[in-house]
Amino acid sequence: MKSLAELEQIRKQTLAKVNLRKEDDDSIRVVVGMATCGIAAGARPVMKAIMDEIEKRNISNCYVTQTGCIGLCRLEPIVEVYLPGSEKITYVKMDADKAAKIVNETIVNGKVVNEYTIGAAKEN
Amino acid sequence: MELARGHVLVCGGTGCTSSGSNNIIEQFEKSLAEKGLQDEIKVVRTGCFGLCALGPIVIVYPEGAFYSLVTPEDVPEIVEEHLLKGRIVKRLLYKETVVDDDNIKSLNEVDFYKKQQRIALVNCGVINPESIDEYIAFGGYSALGKVLSEMKPQDVIDEIKESGLRGRGGGGFPTGLKWQFTANAQGDKKYVACNADEGDPGAFMDRSILEGDPHSLIEAMAIAAYAVGADEGYVYIRAEYPIAVNRLRIAIEQAKEYGLLGKNIFDSGFNFELDIRLGAGAFVCGEETALMTSIEGHRGEPRPRPPFPAVKGLFGKPTLLNNVETYANITAIINNGAEWFKTIGTESSKGTKVFAVGGKINNTGLVEIPMGTTLREIVYEIGGGIPNGKKFKAAQTGGPSGGCIPANLIDTPIDYDSLISIGSMMGSGGLIVMDEDTCMVDIAKFFLEFTVDESCGKCAPCRIGTKRLLEILNKITSGNDTLEDIDRLEQLCYSIKNAALCGLGQTAPNPILSTLKYFRDEYVAHVVDKKCPAGVCKALLSYVIEPDKCKGCSLCAKKCPVGAIEGVVKNPFTIDTSKCIKCGVCMDSCKFGAISKR
């Protein structure tokens, strides 16, 4: 260890991996529907894609969790994103590519991807 | 380390390990693999969470679900329900955390944790103690970085002095002053040492810090070494702490690998080497001069002071010796500043103190409280009260060197000076709670048996004196004594206190003196009435069957191992006191409550 910068680098790299143990309300929460309906519709690859993307981008203020059936089985896989201080965003009929996109748009940039939301799906 | 969406934290402290947490970890790994979740969920073995009474404990993040009394059979259910399907297993949750069907409370709002403030234990139960990266992620080694890049040695000492930190090993000597003395001492070579020879019966604070957060000790010792001008350090730790020794070894290796121990740390020109010395478990080796004698490779015996270790310590060189918990406060003081530290605690005792709470209390475990918290808060709020609705009688602090605090002083604030003023001491942090069924003479005898065993024998007052004290106590508890014996006992206590060579002997009479001070009537009852009021001292007891309650079922007679109970079925039985060995089996077996001890 030769410098504080080196220490800071290790700290940042590891923080992303442990910060879900900190009780911190400023984190973004991503919830994947993982009941039988969700899993059957492909929720697992969706979650995997979200995790991979978060790791690739070294995002530290976000954690991924799962939930049971929310009653909209026909729209599974469903992913809900809770941004601190704003309403939850519900994305439906997810797949791995869409999941990667919402990580980039919603989690990193805080923008809603309208075309994937439950609102857009209902209009169809 | 891979990114995981969930972390399963399993307590790997000695308490939970002995109640089987290793099997739980294995079962988690197996069950997770069966469900294909092994890459998503990470299982982490941590240090002690503190609530040892409910171990083994498992915490699942990000939900923060606190599962208590977990068995390996419960694990597949947690994996299937919670980790796969996202449904928390409510029946296994620590009941205090459950608000209603849909909500769980944060741990910080639970009675056991609410009044606690964690400084020394901040990382215990949060990080994986075998991962230096996790320690760094939670701010580790930044204090050492700050010290080496921004502060002069004297700045560090001034900061510690200013903080008001006092030695957590029991004596309460101001830590900053000790550092100053060592820094001022003349010498071509200096040492820092850590006393991890925790020997008080029932105390496990230092062990828990070493098991849960070993890097905090390494970092603090490096800071201390820089401040006093040392380049070599020793941790003296008892060999009976295998988990702690192992984790500290791993931590030292990792720190060396990262260049946080060794030559030219942070490119500052500061060198520091750290090594472990194992103690064979002699209580006297917790005394500073005996500890250093033992590190040097000699038989662990104390020597007279002065010279103090700060002037002439290890290998005759100036040495700084602090306790584990004292070191565990250092990084927080450097990172947050002395001003912050001073806001916690009381006027003369700053910061927090860790206690290992045991005995007759519901929540046995490890607690860290701000100084000035009252004993009542510890026993009734954090500790959850006394089991079976019994009454609180006294608490023993400071182990065999300390004294008892009786029920009428339960509102005493816990700090160094208040405890001394009521005849006890802070001690290293063992806190043994006693209920109405405890005989205070018997407690004093228990601690004296310990010191008689542990006396090293170098000085006569301790070697011979404690033995005589124990003999008098034995006389009292067996009913063969006179009131003069109590006076003689008290007089001998003061002689030993004045004449013994080291802290062990000087404090050995404390349990007797403090029980005499607050519970003299119990001693008198033993001597004059030949009765033990708490019903503990066997020689003074007799078991009696009350004829009007006895149904003559003969169960007690069948259970009695010495055939001391006789009678005719359906008529009251009687106990032959000349044969009775007072084992109490008859009383436990009677279904009608007809047997009592008097």
Image (cartoon, rainbow, N blue to C red):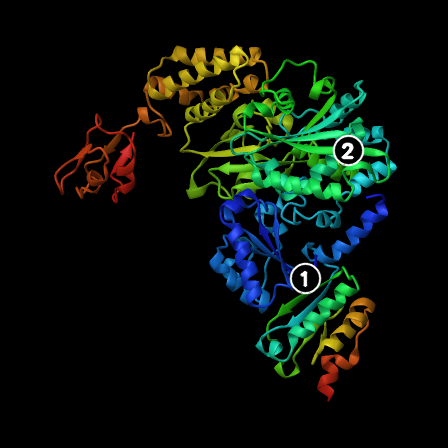
Q: Position of residue B213 (x, y in %)?
A: 66, 43
* Pointer 2 chain: B
Q: Is residue A80 left or right of residue B396?
A: right
Name the residue carrying label 2: B272
Whether discs 1 and 2 lie on one chain: the answer is yes
On the image, the x and y values in percent for residue B410 come to 54, 32
Tell whether B594 sits left or right of B423: left
Q: Indicate the secondary structure of the residue bearing disc 2.
A: strand
Helix, strand or loop under label 1: loop
Q: Which quadrant, please, contains the C terminus of chain B? A: top left
The extreme left residue here reads: B568
Question: Could one spot residue B275 in this view of the protein?
Answer: yes
Q: Is residue B183 left or right of residue B371?
A: right
Mark 1, residue position: B4
Q: Quadrant of residue B391?
A: top left
The answer to whether B51 appears left or right of B313 in the picture is: left
